[in-house]
Image: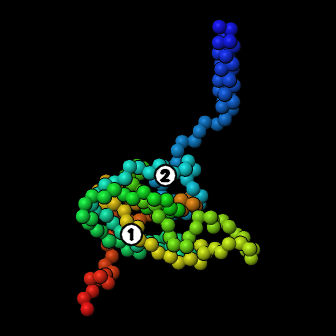
Amino acid sequence: MRAFIVGLVCVAAIAAFALAAGADRPPAAPPADAGAVDAGATGPARGGYLPDPPPLVTRHQWVLDLAYRAGEVSLQGARRIALPRPTPTARMMGRFAVELYVGRELVDRMRFNFPLLGAGEIGDDTTSWSAPPSFERGLSASTAVMIPHSERATRALIVDRATGRQWPVPWPPTVRDAGPSPAATTH
């Protein structure tokens, strides 16, 4: 019984110490609005990023043609496609993400990368001959990203998760007719 009381006193003392140690810290900041549009932001969001929501499952998808040039991301075109059956949004790793929102609610996120662009190059000003090659400063790259069509979404953002920069994208995207695709051309 004596060991039990000594153990209980120790636990109470540790709990009191932990509470007292936290009392001199300022209260935790409220979570950052991960949906706030700030195209000039630098650094990841203060509170981190929201976790990926459950994937949307839809037959209708958008293919966004995106370009990266000198640190800027732009939408070059978009086309809507219909799949044979409803398909969930693919989950993958990537420095960049297209995020769909309703107000502040994250509806879906599709991560992606641009070819030859590595996250390890951010802020790396090494000019040593022994430094690994860096493509970011002069890189011009493009990629296509497939995202689900969402009737609920009211806005879309492209987010550079390494730097925190954001670029708004019209939602739903404006379809740009680039002419017939090579597969549709008759000879």
Q: Earlier in the sequence, mark 2 or mark 1?
A: 2
Type of amino acid at the residue the image marks with label 1: Leu
Task: Please tell me the numbered disc located at residue 41.
Answer: none
* 26 vs 157: above or below: above
Q: How many marks?
A: 2
Q: Are marks 2 and 1 in contact (CB under 8 Å)?
A: no
Residue 36 on image: x %, y %: 48, 54
Quarter of the figure that contains the C terminus = bottom left
Q: Nearer the viewer, residue 26 or 84?
A: 84
Type of amino acid at the residue the image marks with label 2: Ala
Q: Residue furthest top?
A: 1
- Residue shown at 27% from the left, 86% from the top: 185
Front label number (2 vs 1): 1
Quarter of the figure that contains the N terminus = top right
Q: Nearer the viewer, residue 156 or 118?
A: 118
- Residue shown at 65% from the left, 20% from the top: 11
Horizontally, is 61 left or right of 75 in the view? Answer: left
Can residue 157 be seen here? The reply is no
Say which quarter of the image contains residue 121: bottom right
Q: On the image, numbered disc 1 is attached to which residue? A: 64
* 12 vs 100: above or below: above
Q: On the image, numbered disc 2 is attached to which residue? A: 34
- Residue shown at 56% from the left, 77% from the top: 139
Residue 179 on image: x %, y %: 30, 83
Say which quarter of the image contains residue 130: bottom right
Say which quarter of the image contains residue 144: bottom left
Residue 110 on image: x %, y %: 42, 60
Q: Nearer the viewer, residue 138 or 40?
A: 138
What is the secondary structure assignment of the residue under circle 1? strand
